[in-house]
Amino acid sequence: MTSLDSATNAPKPSARELPDVSQLVVGVLGGTGDQGRGLALRLARAGQQVIIGSRDAARAEASAAELGDGALGVRGADNATVARESDVVIVAVPWDGHAATLSALREELAGKIVVDCVNPLGFDKQGAYALKPEEGSAAQQAAALLPDSRVTAAFHHLSAVLLQDESVERIDTDVLVLGEERAATDIVQALAERIPGMRGVFAGRLRNAHQVEGLVANLISVNRRYKAHAGLRITDV
Amino acid sequence: MTSLDSATNAPKPSARELPDVSQLVVGVLGGTGDQGRGLALRLARAGQQVIIGSRDAARAEASAAELGDGALGVRGADNATVARESDVVIVAVPWDGHAATLSALREELAGKIVVDCVNPLGFDKQGAYALKPEEGSAAQQAAALLPDSRVTAAFHHLSAVLLQDESVERIDTDVLVLGEERAATDIVQALAERIPGMRGVFAGRLRNAHQVEGLVANLISVNRRYKAHAGLRITDV
């Protein structure tokens, strides 16, 4: 999409080779939570067809109807329906429901691109800290539970506050995208780049997902110290 | 720390309250390695008094004499001397020598601000991956081995190539600074901000150092994919 001629305009780093994802249906498991609802809003505003998932279909439908005052055409459904009807499925459930949710959807998610954006964190009086899942990371747990899916990890560092604030037009941040398969990570990068201000940056294999997930604990510390909604940019790409 | 009035001018987030560190002597253990030499060069160019340390004093002296064609006044000495004569000691040794080097310097480093910038990484055919030290992170290992020192962690994500390239005037990146004690992390932030283009950003306690150290594996993946010398910026601070 970006020719070499325009390279001096700081192009999105991977824009040239990224696929057109505008026709893909995106499902959001845990779409009634802050992160999931925020991502659904942003993707729908960008013109993506979005389905919000929840264990409770009625709750998902209500949440979908609220987004953009119902003008965005977001649908809601139970998680299994969302998994079945989506091309790309974003996993935005709480960490403590992560394994159970994915285990139950193994068949529905077969062949789909799964985008794990779950951050396993603990909290105590000193703030947040990274948990270390047995599999190494939430994304690796997803890959272990979903052997027939194309598991990636992305969208970890977005401020749910900014995502959900409808007055915010652009979210200037990079989305680190991890995965084993180039075709899948390219699609996820392209999806991130549908949202104004965001770039999708490939940042390694799933075995390096733990530190990307855990870094949210650091961003929470940044937010506390600086009263910010911190995000990340990767320089020199 | 940023008042509402000045927030629109995007100041260095912590600049107003950071201490003057221009008179502090900075030692660099492992200062003959790429990262250490690069940091020594940048700090000396910023006017800081710098001593390079190595197990071998002659090697440290030779390395110091080369920096800035000898015009920067950088000294070299054995590690113990460097630790004793410095106010702030940057630990830039290879991970496999980390514990042994610090254990041997416990007395010399007592009362000093120690800045660990070591990234425990493994490498194989698929690239780099984060190692998980028994203590949680290199920084926590340092804290465990140096109970009488003021241990912080910082300078993990700097490109040694850029640091050492004398034609590069500015390095536009944020330095994440971690530690338990505000006075110490403030000093390290201030030290980072002596280098043109760098900001020091407080990013949590040492228990959250692992993911900051490990993120270098991801930046290595970024560098491979985009042929870059990737660094980090924190947005909204």
Image (spheres, coloured by chain):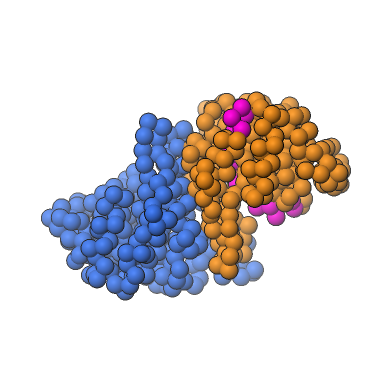
Chain colours: A orange, B blue
Looking at the rendering, which quadrant does residue A110 occupy? Answer: top right
The reply, left or right, for residue B202 in relation to residue B118 is right
Q: Residue at x 78, y 33 (%)?
A: A81
Location of the C terminus of chain B (image quadrant) = bottom right
Location of the N terminus of chain B (image quadrant) = bottom right
Q: Is residue B37 visible?
A: no
The reply, left or right, for residue A45 in relation to residue B236 is right
Q: Which span of residues is magenta-colored?
A: A146-165
Q: Position of residue A12 (x, y in %)?
A: 57, 36
Query: Relative to residue A149, is residue A28 depicted above or below?
Result: below
The foreground one among A184 and A123 is A123
Q: Residue at x 59, y 49 (%)?
A: A119
Q: How many marks?
A: 0
Q: Position of residue B160 (x, y in %)?
A: 34, 46
Looking at the rendering, which quadrant does residue A230 occupy? Answer: bottom right
The foreground one among B210 and B21 is B210
Q: Residue at x 50, y 44 (%)?
A: A136
Q: Is residue A125 visible?
A: yes
Q: Residue at x 59, y 41 (%)?
A: A154
